[in-house]
Amino acid sequence: MLLIGNKHLQLMITYSLYSSPIGHLRLRADKNSLLAVDHVNQQKTLDPHWQKDERHPVLTQAAVELSEYFAKERTTFDVPLLPIGTDFQRQVWNALQTIPYGESRSYSDIANAINNPKAVRAVGLANGRNPLSIFIPCHRVIGKNGTLTGYAGGLSAKTTLLELERTGELF
């Protein structure tokens, strides 16, 4: 059961595992959309109600698109996404999707993009709660002075993703 606003939704969650250059990822979907990408190093507990299905169409599409992304054959994603969060979080995640491939933005840039320039810290928190990393490119957000900041998969994974997009090289 999932609470969204004041509504309870019963979602059938299916997952598969994907081995990537930045580590193992757990892809989760409902019937029609990709819900989450978990870096296995996050130690996120498997819910006993989730079902493993390596042939689920959404999960298969997500895996193919990730493979194309890591092979430098894809710069945008087509798999249907359903990021579950607050209205503010979804506003931030929508702004993240406007950051062009190979570029980065600061938290301040994102706060300005959503017309809430004083919400820099809240943008950082929403960025950190992005359930669909890579697909919603939170790795493209860096500190205002150009420093790398946190990433669910670790800073080495963030560095790898940024370098892949900027130079085409995997580290």
Image (cartoon, rainbow, N blue to C red):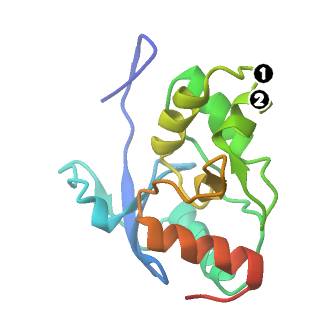
- At x 61%, y 23%, the residue is 119
> Looking at the rendering, which quadrant does residue 72 occupy?
bottom right
- In the rendered image, the quadrant that contains the N terminus is top left
Residue 31's place in the image compared with 42, above or below, is above
Q: Amino acid at mark 1?
A: Asn
Residue 76's place in the image compared with 47, above or below, is below
Q: Is residue 92 left or right of residue 63?
A: right
Residue 96's place in the image compared with 84, above or below, is below
Residue 84 in view (yes/no): no
Residue 45 in the image: state x and y as whole percent.
20, 53
Are dots 2 and 1 in contact, CB under 8 Å? Answer: yes
- At x 60%, y 72%, the residue is 161
Q: Is residue 65 left or right of residue 37?
A: right
Q: Residue tagged by mark 1?
A: 115
- In the rendered image, the quadrant that contains the C terminus is bottom right
Q: Amino acid at mark 2?
A: Asn
- SS type, badge 2: helix
- SS type, badge 1: loop
> Badge 2 local density, few (<14 within 10 Å), some, or many (20+)?
some
Residue 137's place in the image compared with 112, above or below, is below
> Looking at the rendering, which quadrant does residue 38 occupy?
bottom left
Kindly give the residue lying farthest to the front in the view shown.
145
Residue 28 in the image: state x and y as whole percent.
42, 56
Q: Residue tagged by mark 2?
A: 112
